[in-house]
Image (cartoon, coloured by chain):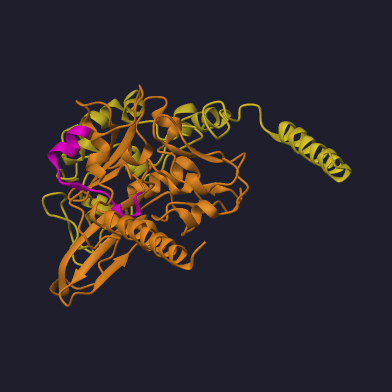
Chain colours: A orange, B yellow
Amino acid sequence: MNLKTEKSSRRKFLNTVALLTGGLLVSSVTKPFNGLLAASNKPEGNGPWYGIGIDIEKCIGCGRCANACKEENDVPRVPFYFRSWVEQYTIKNDGEIIVESPNGGIDGFTQSVPDEDIFKSFFVPKMCNHCSKPPCVQVCPVGATFETKEGVVLVDSNYCIGCGYCVQACPYGCRYIHPEKKTADKCSLCYHRISKGIAPACMEICPNDARIFGNLRDKEGELVKFLKEHTCHVLKPEMNTGSKLFYNALNQEVK
Amino acid sequence: MPQQIKKLLIVFTIVFGIFFIIKYALKPKSFGEFGHYRGLAIIENENKQVKYVGIEACNECHDDIVSYKKEGPHVNLQCEVCHGPGYLHIQDPETNKLIIPSKRENCGICHQKNAARSENNITQVDLKEHNVENKCIDCHKSHNPYEFKD
């Protein structure tokens, strides 16, 4: 083979590789995951496909959701183990952002910044996003976590080996290793309740109706109505997780 | 076929054979029923105990309080927000009493003044200033807090 053609084919190869990687990078930046588009373009199937809506404007930060979740699902009462919790974001006049979540908000919030220094303050309740492309499910080596046909991400605690890959994989920090069971644990959207037709504990207990859950396939349903009437965003769209937890009035500062 | 390949084939067959036998023996029966997971796990998740029973269950015995609560601003509140989950209480009300919160901090969880709370959403007081000597429920009726005790 002559030297010239070999050189040119190598150059061609390198060019193609550069073009492909560059193209992928650019397309991921210009076309990140869009929560609303994903909600409008649902996977094929019958029956409910659940999503969650949280209205930050309505949340009063009482933390009753976090408390009810611990009671309902036997989550250890000590801090650091949460399936659901509330954060208080405070943006100060000097541009500093303070995020607090004392015991997940269960014991209530005490305002740590005096009124005159605050530019804006708001509560952000957090929980599993029940992603439609869940990274936690992709990494599980034994198939102990999965997405049901209703779009709920569950853990099979009898099959989990407690390796903790999923805890690392979740970009929202929604998983933990249960200190007694030594298996992964997370929000199940109260699967034992929704399968009986009752709302999840956190949604039922919310005193200001700031949290709703509903069927994204039901065009007349509460959640679709919520998405139509509010400006909703998902957390970390750049992660392309296919999050189905939609926040109304979500500020860009929330991570 | 060369002899060494034949021997290798035998070894491979044995190794893969053992692998598939072990895999078959260890794989739970319901695995793969709906996807790459144990189908039974769905039923196990479904069968957990429901602990928050809802206001309808409370209404069966405490209809007087439930209807009184409807007259005030706590109308949309579930009883179990303050009193805790009621699943044991509805099974045996005598032995399983619910929490009756009475401390100022209990009310403060929702009503403590905070810059992140909008006045349109919730009535707030500064617990450090408002009638510090007394409990909230010394004056307010908790089920209808704009009515006062005598």
| Quadrant of the rendering where the C terminus of chain A is positioned | bottom left
Task: Tell whether position A232 is magenta.
Answer: yes
Q: Quadrant of residue B22?
A: top right
Q: Which residue of the protein is positioned furthest toward the front in this rendering?
A: A2
Q: What residue appears at the point 44 percent right and 47 percent down from the top-left corner?
A: A70
Is A107 colored magenta in this rendering?
Answer: no
Q: Nearer the viewer, residue B58 or A112?
A: A112
Q: Position of residue A118 (x, y in %)?
A: 16, 70
Give the camera-side residue of A63 and A39: A39
Can residue A71 be seen in this snapshot?
A: yes
Please name the residue shown 22% across and 36% down the image.
B76
Q: Is residue A85 above or below residue B66?
A: below
In the image, residue B76 above or below residue A117: above
Q: Residue A45: horizontal and vertical position, in percent?
A: 36, 24
The percent coordinates of residue A31 (x first, y second) are: 25, 51
Number of numbered discs visible in the structure rendering: 0
Q: Residue at x 42, y 52 (%)?
A: A174
Residue at the image position 36 percent from the left and 28 percent from the top:
A198
Which residues are the magenta region?
Answer: A224-240
